[in-house]
Amino acid sequence: MAKNMFKLIDGIETEEGLYFFVDYDDEEVRLNRVKPALARVKTDQTYRIPLKNIIDLRIVTKKEVEEKNKSVVARGLTGGFLFGPVGLFLGGLSGTGKKEKNKYNAIFVISYLSSNDSETIRSIVFDASVGNWQMTNSSYVKKLQKMLKNVEPSKDVMAIRNSDGSITL
């Protein structure tokens, strides 16, 4: 059973919008592309990134403001039901305009050096706010970040990372 679930946005040459679960051990991170099967998840492809090649990984939160039109009819009917003809009129008036709602999306980014090309920084970007997985995904990435601190990076990654934690591009 998957402990996390991410939706691919960019960075792997495959169809966008596919789902992955991520696992790791002392040597590598595995990105397991999954296809839903009857009552379970089936891995159909695994992508591996050696931990020593990971420059950084983190979840970034993106705030989106959703604008929705207020429903004149629904507000009018509710007002009319509660307060009669005057409520119908006032409820309809309150339904004009737009309603704003803040929505937060979590984006999981892995930046790494490819084993085949250690001169190019690559990134894989996932939507981490898939369904009910957002809190679980965030917690899982924090564990992975903590474990990554104990990994000796490759010499190529060391050349990019600075002692203060910044990255030279």
Image (cartoon, rainbow, N blue to C red):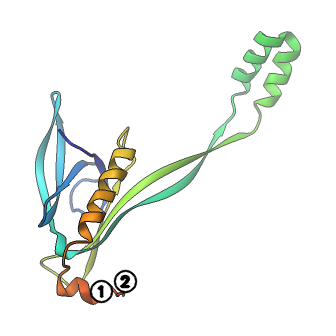
**x and y, in percent, of residue 34 in the image:** 18, 45
Q: Place residue 125 in its image quadrant.
A: bottom left
Mark seen at residue 167: 2
| Left or right side of 47 for 139 | right
Using a 10 Å C-alpha cutoff, classify the residue at mark 1 as few (fewer than 14 neighbours), some (14 to 19) or many (20 or more).
some
Q: Which residue is mark 1?
A: 160
For the N terminus, which image quadrant? top left
Q: Which percent across, then down, holds residue 9? A: 33, 56
Q: Quadrant of the C terminus?
A: bottom left
- Contact between marks 2 and 1 (CB within 8 A): the answer is yes
Query: 168 above or below 41?
Result: below
Q: Nearer the viewer, residue 3 or 6?
A: 3
As shown in the figure, which amino acid type bears the numbered disc 2? Answer: Ile
Residue at the (40%, 57%) spot, across then down? 107
SS at badge 2: loop
Furthest residue in direction right, as rendered: 86
> What's the distance in space between the residues labelled 2 and 1, CA to CA?
6 Å
Is residue 169 at all visible to an observer of this figure? no
